[in-house]
Amino acid sequence: MARLSGIFQSAATLREAGALLSAIIVAVVFSVWTPYFLTLESITSVLVVTSEMAILAMPVTLLMIAGEFDLSVGSVLGLCSVLVPWLMVTWKFPPIVSVLIAFIVALLIGYLHGSLVHKLRIPSFIVTLAGLLFWRGVVFVLTQGFPVRVPPDQVWFFQFFAHRFPNGFNLSLIWFLAYAAILFLILTYDRFGNWVYASGGNERAARKMGVPVDKVRTLLFMLTAVSAFLTGIIQVARFTSVDASRGESLELEMIAASVIGGASLSGGVGSIVGTIIGCLIVGMIRNGLATAGIASYWYTAIIGLLILGAVIVNKTTGRLRTKWAT
Protein backbone atom coordinates (compact mmCIF):
# COMPACT_ATOMS: atom_id res chain seq x y z
CA MET A 1 0.00 0.00 0.00
CA ALA A 2 2.90 2.37 0.80
CA ARG A 3 4.36 1.62 -2.64
CA LEU A 4 1.00 2.41 -4.27
CA SER A 5 0.75 5.66 -2.31
CA GLY A 6 4.29 6.63 -3.32
CA ILE A 7 3.49 6.15 -6.99
CA PHE A 8 0.42 8.36 -6.74
CA GLN A 9 2.32 11.05 -4.81
CA SER A 10 5.08 11.08 -7.45
CA ALA A 11 2.48 11.58 -10.17
CA ALA A 12 0.96 14.44 -8.20
CA THR A 13 4.36 16.14 -7.96
CA LEU A 14 4.70 16.21 -11.74
CA ARG A 15 1.27 17.80 -12.03
CA GLU A 16 2.20 20.46 -9.48
CA ALA A 17 5.01 21.60 -11.74
CA GLY A 18 2.54 22.22 -14.56
CA ALA A 19 0.19 24.07 -12.20
CA LEU A 20 3.04 26.26 -10.95
CA LEU A 21 4.06 27.11 -14.53
CA SER A 22 0.43 28.04 -15.28
CA ALA A 23 0.33 30.29 -12.21
CA ILE A 24 3.48 32.10 -13.34
CA ILE A 25 2.05 32.60 -16.84
CA VAL A 26 -1.23 33.98 -15.44
CA ALA A 27 0.66 36.36 -13.14
CA VAL A 28 2.87 37.62 -15.98
CA VAL A 29 -0.08 38.11 -18.35
CA PHE A 30 -2.08 40.18 -15.87
CA SER A 31 1.01 42.12 -14.75
CA VAL A 32 1.56 43.22 -18.35
CA TRP A 33 -2.15 43.71 -19.03
CA THR A 34 -2.97 45.96 -16.08
CA PRO A 35 -0.60 48.10 -13.95
CA TYR A 36 -2.82 47.65 -10.88
CA PHE A 37 -2.36 43.87 -10.66
CA LEU A 38 0.85 44.04 -8.59
CA THR A 39 -0.29 46.74 -6.16
CA LEU A 40 -0.53 45.85 -2.47
CA GLU A 41 -4.31 46.17 -2.54
CA SER A 42 -4.55 43.76 -5.49
CA ILE A 43 -2.15 41.26 -3.93
CA THR A 44 -4.01 41.22 -0.62
CA SER A 45 -7.29 40.77 -2.50
CA VAL A 46 -5.86 37.76 -4.35
CA LEU A 47 -4.61 36.25 -1.09
CA VAL A 48 -7.99 36.70 0.61
CA VAL A 49 -9.79 34.98 -2.26
CA THR A 50 -7.15 32.25 -2.48
CA SER A 51 -7.15 31.52 1.25
CA GLU A 52 -10.93 31.24 1.47
CA MET A 53 -11.10 29.06 -1.62
CA ALA A 54 -8.27 26.81 -0.46
CA ILE A 55 -9.81 26.17 2.97
CA LEU A 56 -12.70 24.50 1.15
CA ALA A 57 -10.87 23.21 -1.95
CA MET A 58 -8.27 21.20 0.00
CA PRO A 59 -10.82 18.84 1.62
CA VAL A 60 -12.66 18.63 -1.72
CA THR A 61 -9.36 17.45 -3.22
CA LEU A 62 -8.93 14.84 -0.50
CA LEU A 63 -12.38 13.53 -1.30
CA MET A 64 -11.58 13.44 -5.01
CA ILE A 65 -8.35 11.55 -4.28
CA ALA A 66 -10.46 9.03 -2.38
CA GLY A 67 -12.66 8.61 -5.44
CA GLU A 68 -15.73 10.67 -4.47
CA PHE A 69 -17.25 14.07 -5.28
CA ASP A 70 -19.10 16.65 -3.20
CA LEU A 71 -21.24 18.99 -5.28
CA SER A 72 -23.07 20.35 -2.23
CA VAL A 73 -20.26 22.39 -0.65
CA GLY A 74 -21.54 25.71 -1.99
CA SER A 75 -25.02 25.11 -0.60
CA VAL A 76 -23.66 23.84 2.73
CA LEU A 77 -21.52 26.98 2.96
CA GLY A 78 -24.59 29.09 2.23
CA LEU A 79 -26.65 27.26 4.85
CA CYS A 80 -24.05 27.50 7.60
CA SER A 81 -23.26 31.15 6.90
CA VAL A 82 -26.96 32.07 6.87
CA LEU A 83 -27.80 29.96 9.91
CA VAL A 84 -25.48 31.88 12.25
CA PRO A 85 -26.94 35.41 11.83
CA TRP A 86 -30.45 33.94 11.41
CA LEU A 87 -30.24 32.27 14.83
CA MET A 88 -28.87 35.46 16.34
CA VAL A 89 -31.64 37.61 14.86
CA THR A 90 -34.60 35.22 15.08
CA TRP A 91 -33.88 33.33 18.31
CA LYS A 92 -31.55 35.86 19.98
CA PHE A 93 -28.86 33.22 20.44
CA PRO A 94 -25.38 34.43 21.45
CA PRO A 95 -22.79 34.32 18.63
CA ILE A 96 -20.85 31.41 20.13
CA VAL A 97 -24.00 29.28 20.43
CA SER A 98 -25.05 30.10 16.87
CA VAL A 99 -21.60 29.17 15.54
CA LEU A 100 -21.59 25.88 17.49
CA ILE A 101 -25.04 24.97 16.15
CA ALA A 102 -23.89 25.69 12.58
CA PHE A 103 -20.79 23.55 13.19
CA ILE A 104 -22.92 20.63 14.42
CA VAL A 105 -25.26 21.02 11.44
CA ALA A 106 -22.26 20.84 9.08
CA LEU A 107 -20.98 17.68 10.79
CA LEU A 108 -24.39 16.03 10.51
CA ILE A 109 -24.75 17.00 6.84
CA GLY A 110 -21.35 15.50 6.05
CA TYR A 111 -22.18 12.33 7.96
CA LEU A 112 -25.55 12.09 6.20
CA HIS A 113 -23.98 12.42 2.76
CA GLY A 114 -21.29 9.86 3.57
CA SER A 115 -23.81 7.41 5.01
CA LEU A 116 -26.13 7.67 2.00
CA VAL A 117 -23.20 7.04 -0.34
CA HIS A 118 -21.70 4.07 1.46
CA LYS A 119 -24.59 2.41 3.26
CA LEU A 120 -27.08 2.65 0.39
CA ARG A 121 -24.40 2.53 -2.35
CA ILE A 122 -25.74 5.64 -4.07
CA PRO A 123 -23.15 7.46 -6.21
CA SER A 124 -21.77 10.53 -4.45
CA PHE A 125 -22.51 12.61 -7.54
CA ILE A 126 -26.24 11.93 -7.09
CA VAL A 127 -26.29 12.30 -3.31
CA THR A 128 -24.44 15.60 -3.26
CA LEU A 129 -26.31 16.94 -6.29
CA ALA A 130 -29.50 16.36 -4.32
CA GLY A 131 -27.80 18.02 -1.34
CA LEU A 132 -26.87 21.00 -3.48
CA LEU A 133 -30.53 21.56 -4.35
CA PHE A 134 -32.03 20.67 -0.97
CA TRP A 135 -29.73 22.73 1.25
CA ARG A 136 -30.01 25.70 -1.12
CA GLY A 137 -33.77 25.40 -0.77
CA VAL A 138 -33.43 25.47 3.02
CA VAL A 139 -31.37 28.66 2.70
CA PHE A 140 -34.16 30.31 0.70
CA VAL A 141 -36.74 29.17 3.25
CA LEU A 142 -34.73 30.68 6.13
CA THR A 143 -34.01 33.97 4.38
CA GLN A 144 -37.17 34.33 2.29
CA GLY A 145 -34.80 35.68 -0.35
CA PHE A 146 -33.65 38.65 1.79
CA PRO A 147 -30.18 39.28 3.27
CA VAL A 148 -29.66 38.43 6.95
CA ARG A 149 -27.36 40.77 8.85
CA VAL A 150 -25.30 40.18 11.96
CA PRO A 151 -26.57 42.43 14.77
CA PRO A 152 -24.24 45.47 14.95
CA ASP A 153 -23.43 44.92 18.62
CA GLN A 154 -22.26 41.35 17.88
CA VAL A 155 -19.97 42.05 14.92
CA TRP A 156 -16.92 42.15 17.22
CA PHE A 157 -17.15 38.39 17.83
CA PHE A 158 -16.52 37.52 14.19
CA GLN A 159 -13.28 39.48 13.97
CA PHE A 160 -11.61 36.36 15.30
CA PHE A 161 -12.35 34.70 11.96
CA ALA A 162 -11.54 37.49 9.50
CA HIS A 163 -9.92 40.53 11.09
CA ARG A 164 -8.49 42.95 8.53
CA PHE A 165 -5.07 44.33 9.43
CA PRO A 166 -3.99 47.91 8.55
CA ASN A 167 -1.74 46.63 5.72
CA GLY A 168 -4.76 44.99 4.06
CA PHE A 169 -4.02 41.38 4.96
CA ASN A 170 -6.81 39.32 6.48
CA LEU A 171 -6.78 36.91 9.41
CA SER A 172 -8.28 34.29 7.10
CA LEU A 173 -4.79 33.90 5.63
CA ILE A 174 -3.60 32.58 9.02
CA TRP A 175 -6.52 30.15 9.16
CA PHE A 176 -5.62 28.94 5.68
CA LEU A 177 -1.90 28.46 6.43
CA ALA A 178 -2.60 26.51 9.62
CA TYR A 179 -5.24 24.36 7.93
CA ALA A 180 -3.02 23.70 4.91
CA ALA A 181 -0.11 22.63 7.13
CA ILE A 182 -2.31 20.17 9.04
CA LEU A 183 -3.85 18.61 5.93
CA PHE A 184 -0.47 18.44 4.17
CA LEU A 185 1.10 16.58 7.09
CA ILE A 186 -1.85 14.18 7.32
CA LEU A 187 -1.92 13.44 3.61
CA THR A 188 1.86 13.10 3.26
CA TYR A 189 3.06 11.47 6.48
CA ASP A 190 0.07 9.97 8.29
CA ARG A 191 -1.44 6.53 7.77
CA PHE A 192 -4.78 8.17 7.05
CA GLY A 193 -3.20 9.89 4.04
CA ASN A 194 -2.13 6.50 2.69
CA TRP A 195 -5.68 5.28 3.19
CA VAL A 196 -7.03 8.25 1.22
CA TYR A 197 -4.75 7.54 -1.76
CA ALA A 198 -5.39 3.80 -1.61
CA SER A 199 -9.19 4.24 -1.43
CA GLY A 200 -9.25 6.15 -4.70
CA GLY A 201 -6.35 4.42 -6.42
CA ASN A 202 -7.58 0.85 -6.17
CA GLU A 203 -10.61 0.38 -3.94
CA ARG A 204 -10.73 -3.40 -4.22
CA ALA A 205 -7.05 -3.81 -3.35
CA ALA A 206 -7.39 -1.31 -0.51
CA ARG A 207 -10.28 -3.25 1.03
CA LYS A 208 -8.32 -6.51 0.80
CA MET A 209 -5.43 -4.83 2.61
CA GLY A 210 -7.70 -3.79 5.46
CA VAL A 211 -8.22 -0.12 4.58
CA PRO A 212 -11.58 1.09 6.04
CA VAL A 213 -12.60 2.69 2.75
CA ASP A 214 -16.17 3.54 3.76
CA LYS A 215 -15.05 5.08 7.04
CA VAL A 216 -12.33 7.12 5.32
CA ARG A 217 -14.73 8.51 2.75
CA THR A 218 -17.42 9.31 5.33
CA LEU A 219 -14.87 11.22 7.41
CA LEU A 220 -13.86 13.15 4.29
CA PHE A 221 -17.48 14.07 3.56
CA MET A 222 -17.69 15.39 7.12
CA LEU A 223 -14.43 17.29 6.63
CA THR A 224 -15.68 19.00 3.46
CA ALA A 225 -18.90 20.03 5.22
CA VAL A 226 -17.00 21.41 8.22
CA SER A 227 -14.65 23.26 5.87
CA ALA A 228 -17.68 24.76 4.14
CA PHE A 229 -18.87 25.88 7.59
CA LEU A 230 -15.49 27.50 8.37
CA THR A 231 -15.36 29.29 5.02
CA GLY A 232 -18.92 30.46 5.53
CA ILE A 233 -18.14 31.89 8.96
CA ILE A 234 -15.09 33.70 7.56
CA GLN A 235 -17.30 35.28 4.90
CA VAL A 236 -19.88 36.25 7.51
CA ALA A 237 -17.06 37.98 9.39
CA ARG A 238 -15.93 39.82 6.25
CA PHE A 239 -19.33 41.00 5.01
CA THR A 240 -21.46 40.92 8.25
CA SER A 241 -24.37 40.07 5.96
CA VAL A 242 -25.46 36.93 4.13
CA ASP A 243 -27.92 36.53 1.28
CA ALA A 244 -29.57 33.45 -0.19
CA SER A 245 -27.08 33.23 -3.06
CA ARG A 246 -24.02 32.88 -0.83
CA GLY A 247 -21.85 30.04 -2.12
CA GLU A 248 -23.74 29.49 -5.39
CA SER A 249 -21.64 27.70 -8.06
CA LEU A 250 -18.76 27.50 -5.58
CA GLU A 251 -18.60 23.72 -5.97
CA LEU A 252 -17.53 24.19 -9.61
CA GLU A 253 -14.71 26.52 -8.57
CA MET A 254 -13.55 23.96 -5.99
CA ILE A 255 -13.43 21.18 -8.56
CA ALA A 256 -11.73 23.55 -11.01
CA ALA A 257 -9.02 24.45 -8.49
CA SER A 258 -8.47 20.78 -7.63
CA VAL A 259 -8.25 19.68 -11.26
CA ILE A 260 -6.02 22.60 -12.24
CA GLY A 261 -3.78 21.62 -9.32
CA GLY A 262 -3.42 18.11 -10.71
CA ALA A 263 -6.18 16.10 -9.02
CA SER A 264 -7.64 13.30 -11.12
CA LEU A 265 -11.38 13.03 -11.70
CA SER A 266 -11.04 9.25 -11.49
CA GLY A 267 -9.44 9.34 -8.02
CA GLY A 268 -6.10 8.31 -6.57
CA VAL A 269 -4.15 11.43 -7.57
CA GLY A 270 -3.92 14.91 -6.10
CA SER A 271 -2.09 17.00 -3.53
CA ILE A 272 -2.52 19.87 -1.11
CA VAL A 273 0.20 21.97 -2.74
CA GLY A 274 -1.31 21.50 -6.19
CA THR A 275 -4.74 22.53 -4.95
CA ILE A 276 -3.33 25.68 -3.34
CA ILE A 277 -1.68 26.59 -6.64
CA GLY A 278 -4.97 25.92 -8.42
CA CYS A 279 -6.78 28.25 -6.00
CA LEU A 280 -4.09 30.88 -6.55
CA ILE A 281 -4.62 30.68 -10.32
CA VAL A 282 -8.39 31.05 -9.95
CA GLY A 283 -7.91 33.93 -7.49
CA MET A 284 -5.52 35.74 -9.81
CA ILE A 285 -7.89 35.35 -12.75
CA ARG A 286 -10.84 36.68 -10.74
CA ASN A 287 -8.89 39.66 -9.43
CA GLY A 288 -7.04 40.27 -12.71
CA LEU A 289 -10.27 40.50 -14.70
CA ALA A 290 -11.69 42.91 -12.12
CA THR A 291 -8.64 45.20 -12.16
CA ALA A 292 -8.60 45.13 -15.97
CA GLY A 293 -12.26 46.19 -16.05
CA ILE A 294 -13.41 43.02 -17.84
CA ALA A 295 -17.06 41.98 -17.45
CA SER A 296 -17.55 39.37 -14.72
CA TYR A 297 -19.21 36.81 -17.01
CA TRP A 298 -15.86 36.21 -18.70
CA TYR A 299 -14.67 34.73 -15.41
CA THR A 300 -17.09 31.81 -15.67
CA ALA A 301 -16.12 31.19 -19.28
CA ILE A 302 -12.41 31.17 -18.45
CA ILE A 303 -12.90 28.80 -15.51
CA GLY A 304 -14.72 26.41 -17.85
CA LEU A 305 -11.82 26.52 -20.30
CA LEU A 306 -9.33 25.98 -17.47
CA ILE A 307 -11.14 22.84 -16.31
CA LEU A 308 -11.13 21.43 -19.83
CA GLY A 309 -7.50 22.40 -20.37
CA ALA A 310 -6.42 20.89 -17.04
CA VAL A 311 -8.17 17.59 -17.81
CA ILE A 312 -6.49 17.46 -21.22
CA VAL A 313 -3.09 18.14 -19.67
CA ASN A 314 -3.65 15.53 -16.97
CA LYS A 315 -4.71 12.94 -19.54
CA THR A 316 -1.71 13.72 -21.72
CA THR A 317 0.81 13.55 -18.88
CA GLY A 318 -0.85 10.34 -17.69
CA ARG A 319 -0.26 8.73 -21.09
CA LEU A 320 3.34 9.93 -21.06
CA ARG A 321 3.95 8.45 -17.63
CA THR A 322 2.43 5.16 -18.79
CA LYS A 323 4.65 5.18 -21.86
CA TRP A 324 7.78 5.92 -19.82
CA ALA A 325 6.88 3.20 -17.32
CA THR A 326 6.74 0.61 -20.08
Image (cartoon, rainbow, N blue to C red):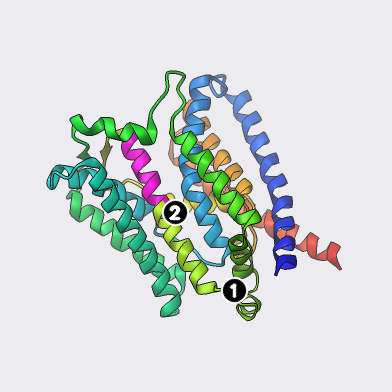
Q: Is residue 193 visible?
A: yes
Horizontal and vertical percent position of residue 261: 62, 49
Q: Is residue 262 above or below residue 65?
A: above
Circle 2 Cα neighbour tier, 10 Å, few/some/many (<14 / 14–19 / ≥20): many
| Residue drawn at the location 63% of the way across and 46% of the way down | 273
Q: Is residue 85 above or below residue 308?
A: above
Nearest the viewer among 105 and 49 is: 105
For disc 2, the marked residue is 251
Asked if the stretch drawn in magenta spans residue 125, the answer is: no
Horizontal and vertical percent position of residue 158: 31, 35
Horizontal and vertical percent position of residue 165: 42, 22
Cβ atoms under marks 2 and 1 closer than 8 Å: no
Mark 2 vs 1, N-terminal side: 1
Q: Quadrant of the C terminus?
A: bottom right
For disc 1, the marked residue is 211
| Residue drawn at the location 32% of the way across and 62% of the way down | 133
Horizontal side of 14 relative to 280 (left or right) equals right
Q: Is residue 298 visible?
A: no
> Which image quarter: residue 226?
bottom left
Horizontal side of 1 relative to 277 (left or right) equals right
What range is drawn magenta here? Answer: 227-238
- The image's mark for residue 134 is none
Q: Mark 1: which amino acid?
A: Val
